[in-house]
């Protein structure tokens, strides 16, 4: 298990930081705050990079998380940041990130 604990910790840390940054923020306020969007996007990059680093056996044994999509999303954020849509980032943090964080926490148990 120790070979992927680092990646799980990175996912959880990124998710917790995003939760802190967006806890009291509406979608409209989030989308209007470029600094916040950039900060959250950077934490999403970290979560995606950690998903990309997850060993193949872990990814295969946990198909309920689309590890590949997280890795691709991280690459997109790194390479195409000017094209990043704040509403899309909001959707990811509210509708996709909680499941990734929950899976990471479960795998650490």
Image (spheres, helix red, strand yellow):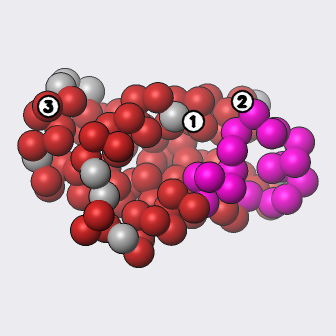
Up/down of 47 relative to 65, above or below: below
Residue at x 45%, y 48% (from the top left corner): 14
Q: Quadrant of the C terminus?
A: top right
Report, in whole angstroms, how far the alpha carbon at label 1 lies from the one at label 2: 9 Å
Residue count near mark 1 (Cα–Cα under 10 Å), binned few <14, some 14–19, many ≥20: many
Q: Is residue 109 left or right of residue 17?
A: right
Question: Is there any visible trace of residue 107 in the rendered image?
Answer: yes
Stretch in magenta: 54-71
Residue 106, labelled with which disc? Answer: 2
Tell me if residue 58 is in the magenta stretch. yes
Q: Which residue is mark 3?
A: 28
x then y, percent, for residue 29 = 11, 34
Do the residues under discs 1 and 3 have CB atoms within 8 angstroms?
Answer: no
x then y, percent, for residue 28 = 14, 31
Q: Secondary structure at mark 1?
A: helix
Q: Nearer the viewer, mark 2 or mark 3?
A: 3
x then y, percent, for residue 101 = 57, 35
Q: Is residue 24 left or right of residue 75?
A: left
Q: Earlier in the sequence, mark 2 or mark 3?
A: 3
Q: Earlier in the sequence, mark 1 or mark 2?
A: 1
């Amino acid at each position: 298990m120790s070979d992927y604990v680092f990646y799980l910790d990175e996912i959880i840390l990124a998710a917790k930081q995003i939760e802190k940054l967006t806890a009291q923020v509406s979608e409209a306020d989030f989308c209007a705050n470029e600094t916040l969007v950039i900060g959250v996007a950077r934490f999403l990059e970290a979560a995606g990079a950690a998903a990309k680093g997850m060993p193949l056996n872990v990814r295969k044994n946990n198909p309920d998380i689309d590890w590949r999509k997280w890795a691709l999303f991280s690459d997109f954020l790194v390479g195409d940041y000017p094209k990043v849509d704040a509403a899309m980032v909001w959707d990811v943090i509210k509708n996709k990130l909680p499941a990734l964080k929950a899976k990471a926490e479960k795998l650490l148990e």
